[in-house]
Image: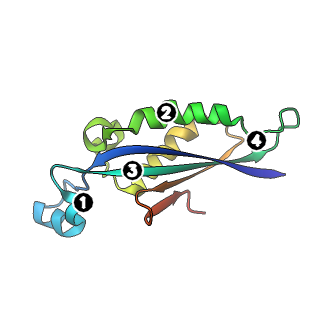
């Protein structure tokens, strides 16, 4: 029997949506105020969902303290209060859209979790705008 456990977290980060292959005018038209050359910030809300079998000894799918520590060390400490474009390696060549941030978080956490778990990330950029990865 598979069960999904979820943990929520929060981080703040700044970014600028900008594609170096486009002109400044094209970037402004495509990304609007999100293309501000001085950046802008979001209060991101993150939900991490881990699905797996319940361990017969512990009764856990995963120890939530372990999941909390993994999220803190590998995601929150890495992204919180950062300028994503300037300070986070993955975004030196990748536009830090909510979609790309979500996939980056998934990749980071996927490396930290046992393959027996299925992982899903939900990232809220605003109260109304959020993305999920993987989508199915």
Is residue 9 shown left or right of residue 34? right
Give coordinates of residue 34: x percent, y percent: 24, 59
Q: Are marks 2 and 4 in contact (CB under 8 Å)?
A: no
- Residue 27 % position (x, y): 18, 63
Secondary structure of the residue carrying tag 3 is strand
Q: Specify the quadrant of the image occupied by residue 64.
A: top right
Closest to the camera, between mark 3 and mark 4, is: 3
From mark 2 to mark 3, how far is it between C-alphas? 18 Å
Residue 19, given in percent of the width and then of the height, sits at: 22, 56
Q: Distance from label 2 to label 4 (Cα)?
A: 20 Å
Q: Classify mark 3: residues with Cα within 10 Å, few (<14), some (14-19) or many (20+).
A: some
Can you say whether 62 is above or below 102 in the image?
above
Q: Earlier in the sequence, mark 2 or mark 1?
A: 1
For the C terminus, give its image quadrant.
bottom right
Mark nearer the N terminus (3 vs 1): 1
Residue at image coords 42%, 57%: 99
Q: Secondary structure at mark 1?
A: helix
The mark found on residue 79 in the picture is none
Disc 3: which residue: 43
Q: Residues within 10 Å of mark 4 (few under 14, many from 20)?
A: some
Disc 2 target residue: 74
| Circle 4 residue | 61
Q: Mark 2: which secondary structure?
A: helix
User: Do residues under tags 1 and 4 come within 8 Å of each other at their CB atoms?
Assistant: no
Disc 3 or 4, which lies upstream in sequence?
3
- Per the model, the C-alpha gap separating discs 1 and 4 is 39 Å
Does residue 7 appear to the left or right of 24 in the view shown? right
């Amino acid at each position: 029997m598979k069960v999904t456990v979820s943990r929520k977290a929060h981080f703040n980060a700044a970014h600028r949506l900008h594609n170096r292959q486009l002109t400044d005018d094209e970037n402004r038209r495509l990304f609007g105020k999100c293309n501000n050359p001085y950046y802008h910030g979001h209060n991101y809300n993150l939900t991490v969902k881990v699905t797996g079998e319940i361990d017969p000894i512990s009764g856990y799918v995963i120890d939530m303290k372990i999941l909390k520590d993994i999220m803190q060390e590998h995601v929150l400490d890495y992204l919180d209060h950062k300028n994503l474009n300037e300070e986070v390696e993955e975004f030196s060549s990748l536009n830090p859209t909510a979609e790309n941030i979500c996939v980056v978080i998934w990749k980071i956490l996927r490396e930290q979790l046992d393959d027996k778990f299925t992982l899903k990330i939900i990232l809220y950029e605003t109260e109304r705008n959020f993305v999920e990865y993987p989508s199915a």
